[in-house]
Amino acid sequence: MECGYCKGNRAHLVKKTASDCSKSYGMLADEMTAEAYERFLSCGWRRSGIHLYKPCNFESCCPTLTIRLAAPKFSITKSQQKVLNKMQNLLHPPSRKAQKRKRSSLSAELAVLEGSGMLHDLQKSTQQALERCLAHYPEGSHRWNISFKARKPSKQDQKQGKILLVSSICAQIAGKLQLKREELVQTVVSAIQTPDPKSDMSVLSIRSHAKSGQILVTLVMKERSRPDVPMLDATQIDDVDDKLDLWYKTTTGKVLKAEQRKLEVTTLAAHESALLPEVHRLYAHYQHVVHQDPDPFTTGDTPPDKDGPLDWGKAPAYFTNGIVGMLEGYCQGHSEERREIIIANYYSFYQFLVESPFPVDSEEPIRSPAYGTYHQHYKVGDVLIAVGVVDILPTGFSSVYLFYHPSFSHDLVALGKFAILKEVEYTNQILKLPYYYLGYYIESCPKMRYKAEYKPSELLCPKHHQWVAVENAIPKLEKTPRHVCALVEKADEENNSQDLLHQLPMDIGAGMNVTFGMLQTNGKDVVRPILEDFIEAAGTELSKDCILRLT
C-alpha cells in the first residue's frame, strides 16, 4: 500500500512502486487480555480498534519503531515547560490593571514598530522569498503565512535600541515537505529582500538559526528613540486582554464565567464516552478540519449500502442498551439520507477509537482505573476541547489517538504537545506505571521525530525486540539509507527461530495440534513460509505461547 508518511517519495529505496512501498502484518483480535496485548506491543505491534498491525520495517520505505518513555524519570525541557506555562497563563491571565501597566511601559516601542510599517514589509518580503524557494513544489503545498514575533533581548541589545524578531515557520514547512530545515531556512534568508528603512527603524541584520530552523531579524532604533524603554515581549504582538475569553465567546456565543476558568481532565471508559454526542461531534470536526475528511453533518456522498444492523462486537451491556436511543436523538432534525451518513461516520469512529479487545465493562466513575481502553476528556467551561484515547496496561500507559478542537490548538495552546505532558503526568503520578508508550518513532519523517524529545526514551529493536536507549539507537538509524537496522546483536537468534519453527503447535482441524515435523513434505513446503512470517512478526518469545490456526 502507499506510505502515509512519504506518499511514495521513498519507494525507490525498497525498489517498489509508490502505491506498494509500505507493508505490514495485520490480524483481528475479537477478545484479548490487556496483558497479552502488552506483550504484542513489546514486539512492535499496535492496534486500531480490534485490528492489530505491525509494520514490516525491513520491506517498507518509512520504517516505524515503537518508542516508550520511562515516566518516573521524565525530565521536562524548557520548550515543553513553556507549553504548560502557556496553558496556565491562558486560564489565569494577568489582571487588566497589570496588563495596562505593561502595555503603557511598552507603548513607545510598540508605536514605533507598528507605526513604521516595517513589520508588515518584513513579513511580506519573507513570504515572497519563501514562495520563490518553494515554487517547484505542488501548488498549495506551502500556503503558510509568515509571522514574526518579538523576542526578549539581552540587556546590551536593549541599551542599543535593538528589537529582535523571530519566525519559526520554516521548521514547520520543512517537516511537511520532507525537507532539511537547516537548508530551507538558509535559502529563504538569502532570498529575502531587505525592506527600506522606515522612520525611526531599520533592519540591522537577517540571519538563520540552522539548529532551530528559525529566521532571526534584528531591527535597530535610531538615536532619537528611547533605548531605555523595555522591548516588546512576544506575547504583546497580539494586543488582546483575554484570549481564552475571546475564543470562548467566538466558539459558544457565551461569556466565560470566572468559576469556569479551569481545565478539567476526566477519565471515562471508552464505551461510556462514546454515548456522549459531543465526543463524536468533536471527532468529526477535527477530522474534517485537520485531515480534510468530509463533514458528515454537511457533506458526503450517498449513504453507504445497508447490510444489516450495526455490529457492536463485545461492547458492554450498558452501551448496547443505550446506543440506539442516543443515535436517534443525535440525528434528529436531519433527513433520512443525512442521518445514514452521520451514523456511518459514527460507526467508523466507534470501530477506530472505541472498540477494543479488552473493553472496560463498567460505567462507574473511574477512581482507580482497571486495565482497558479509556477516553480522557479535556474541558474548559462546558466546551470539550480534546479527547485522548488511551490504553491502561499492566506496566504501561499507551497513547492511541488524540482529537481536539482545531482553533483552540492553533490559536491558544498546542493541544497535541500539552496532552502528551498530561498523559506522562497521569502515568507517573496517578497510575504509578513505569512506561508511557508514544506510538511509533519514524526517523525518515521529520514531523515524527519529536517523540524522541521526551526523555529518557527507548526504541524497540525491529529485529530482536529489545529496548535500546534513544541516544544510542538514533545514530545507528541515521547511518542507514532507510533508517532501519538491528539495534542490538544476537548471534543465536536465527537458530532459535529455526528451533521454534519445529516446536510451534498448529491447529489444522485434525482434532489435535500438530507440529512442523509431523507434516508431509508438500505440507512443509506450504506451511514453512507461513510459520517463518509469523515468528518474525510476533517474535520468538511471544510465538512460544501461541497456537497457530491454519484454515
Image: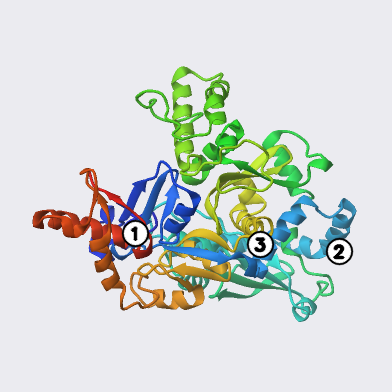
Which of these two is toward me, 190 or 378? 378
Horizontally, residue 541 falls left or right of residue 128, namely: left
Residue at 24% over, 58% down: 531
Q: Residue furthest bottom?
A: 156
Count of marks overlaid on the render? 3
Q: Amino acid at mark 3?
A: Leu
Q: Which residue is mark 2?
A: 105
Say which label, 3 or 1, has the lower sequence index: 3
Q: Which residue is mark 1?
A: 543
Horizontally, residue 539 falls left or right of residue 521, namely: right
Say which label, 2 or 1, has the lower sequence index: 2
Q: Amino acid at mark 2?
A: Ser
Residue at 58% over, 31% down: 275
Which of these two is toward me, 295 or 404? 404
Question: Contact (CB < 8 A) between labels 3 and 2?
Answer: no
What's the CA distance linking mark 2 and mark 1? 69 Å
Q: Is residue 252 above or below residue 53?
A: above
What's the CA distance linking mark 3 and mark 2? 20 Å
Q: Residue furthest front?
A: 512
Local SS, label 1 = helix
Which of these two is toward me, 345 or 9? 345
Q: Amino acid at mark 1?
A: Ser
Between circles 2 and 1, the one closer to the viewer is: 1
Q: Which residue is mark 3?
A: 119
Question: Contact (CB < 8 A) between labels 2 and 1?
Answer: no
